[in-house]
Image (cartoon, grey):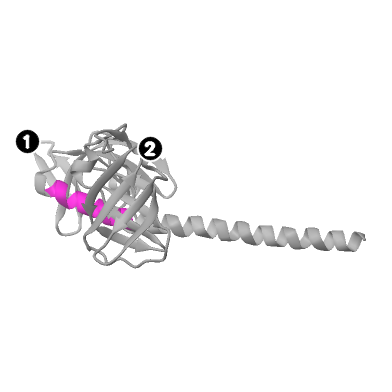
Amino acid sequence: MLIDKISEFVLLESMVMIRTRDHTFGGRITYIDGDVFEIALNDNKRISLGESIGITIYAEGLITFDTYPIGFYRKHILCILPPPVQKRFFQRRKEVLLPVHQLTCIIERELKSADAGSLSNETDSIGEVKNLSMSEILFAAGSVLGLQRNDRVTLHLGEDLQLQAVVQHIKHSGEQPLYLAELQEVTKSAKQTLKSLMIGQLAIHRNAQIESELEVVDHDNKSDEINSYIFNNYRANKK
């Protein structure tokens, strides 16, 4: 039975069949976030990034579509979730606030002239982006920047992306203040570039998260081995 609407929460841990040009194999959905979803493969199959694959999800019926993987890590593939499929979901988060890694930005602060009341731009500082969504950005910058609430800034993320934003909240934590800014009047082109950046960052973030989870499991397994060794030797010594 094909279904029209489904909660994305139902999809987690659902069985999946993946069809490539030469093979068909199974897995389960382990992660959904924004424009991507992740499948943990049952077998150690290798899929080329960008290769067109067919997906069938078994969750209160069947959901079938074509997509392509953008990341592969330890029997996990990260794939694009096509917009037509996203429209069939309900109970979705409107905005994904994504942790990012090793992403800096150049901050231009708009200064108001005391005489004429006009605005001028001045490149003040290099900041570090902490979190990013399609409507907000969280970044850290030196206290010498002197940003205040409602200040307007232009953020340069690489050569191809410039974002205008208004500072909404300031948190003084650690060595550098954290600024949460709301993005303003994002153009269609900038939205596409921003979405591509977030998808790329999500692939990096998810790989790091999987690595951390596996390290915890490995640590727990070693702890169990040590506890078992101590317990067994304790019993042997008691006899």
Label 2 Cα crowd, 10 Å radius (few <14 / some 14-19 / many 20+): few
Residue at 36% over, 54% down? 39
Answer whether labels 1 and 2 touch (C-beta < 8 Å): no
Quarter-of-image position of residue 70: bottom left
**Which label number is shown at residue 116?**
1
For marks 1 and 2, give the CA distance.
58 Å
Q: Is residue 178 magenta?
A: no
Q: Is residue 31 visible?
A: yes
Residue at 49% over, 55% down? 213
Q: Write down the region rendered in magenta.
A: 190-203
In this figure, which residue is indicated by the disc labeled 2?
10
Quadrant placement of the C terminus? bottom right
Q: Mark 1 or 2, which is nearer the eye?
A: 2
Per the image, label 2 sits on a secondary structure element best described as helix
Tell me which amino acid carries mark 1.
Ala
25 left or right of 134? right
Q: Position of residue 143 (x, y in %)?
A: 34, 47
